[in-house]
Image (cartoon, rainbow, N blue to C red):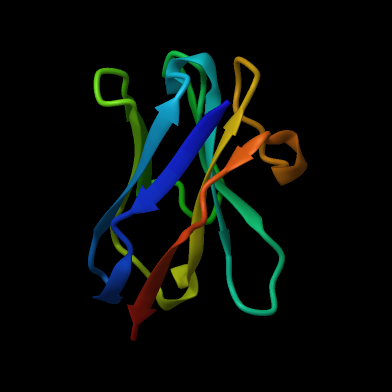
């Protein structure tokens, strides 16, 4: 089992940047594919980015391609989401999730472990 804790959220102006972190404890995250999801008020949870077990491949939602970068640090047991050129529509609670598989999935039911989320608010 793995426990996930997100951090790094906050309030930022449009065009700004934030870096979210997801620290894993328990089993090392190198055993899992990792995903980032977000959920805005009144909307369904949506896939943002994912990284495969071992970090060899990444996947992004079309809405964040070219602006967000997902990476991992095995030594720190941490996954990151670097978010640049933020837009007001990026405002949401961002969740980190782990999946017992090689590759990330864009479908949230495919994940076995979840963090509690961190709020990202982008002002216009």
**Direction from residue 39 to residue 81 in the image, left or right:** left
Depicted 65 relative to depicted 119: above or below? above
Quadrant of image for the N terminus: top right
Q: Position of residue 4 (x, y in %)?
A: 46, 40
Residue 94 shows in the view: yes
Q: Is residue 96 above or below residue 63?
A: above
Residue 27 left/right relative to 44:
left
Give the residue displayed 54% in from the left and 21% down from the top. 32
Q: Nearer the viewer, residue 90 or 121?
A: 121
The residue that appears at 62% across and 78% down in the rendered structure is 41
From the viewer's perspective, tell me whether residue 26 is left or right of residue 107. left
Residue 67 in sight here: no
Q: Nearer the viewer, residue 67 or 7?
A: 7
Q: Quadrant of residue 54?
A: top left
Q: Which residue corresponds to the image point at 25% horizontal and 18% vertical from the top-left?
A: 75
Query: Quarter holding the C terminus?
Result: bottom left
Residue 96 lies, in percent from the top left, at 50, 45
Q: Nearer the viewer, residue 38 or 60?
A: 38
Indicate the position of residue 83 as horizontal and vertical percent values: 32, 54
Residue 22: x, y in percent?
A: 38, 42
Question: Looking at the rendering, which quadrant does residue 30 occupy?
Answer: top left
Choose top left, top right, bottom left or bottom right for residue 42.
bottom right
Q: How many marks do you count on the picture?
A: 0
């Amino acid at each position: 089992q793995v426990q996930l804790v997100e951090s790094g959220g906050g309030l930022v102006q449009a065009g700004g940047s934030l870096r979210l972190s997801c620290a894993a404890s328990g089993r090392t995250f190198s055993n899992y594919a990792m995903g980032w999801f977000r959920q805005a008020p009144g909307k369904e949870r949506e896939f943002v980015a994912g990284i495969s077990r071992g970090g060899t491949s990444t996947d992004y939602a079309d809405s964040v391609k070219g602006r967000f970068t997902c990476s991992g640090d095995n030594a720190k047991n941490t996954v990151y989401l670097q978010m640049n050129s933020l837009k007001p529509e990026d405002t949401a609670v961002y969740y980190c999730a782990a999946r017992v598989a090689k590759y990330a999935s864009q479908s949230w039911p495919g994940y076995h472990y979840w963090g509690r989320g961190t709020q990202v608010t982008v002002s216009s």
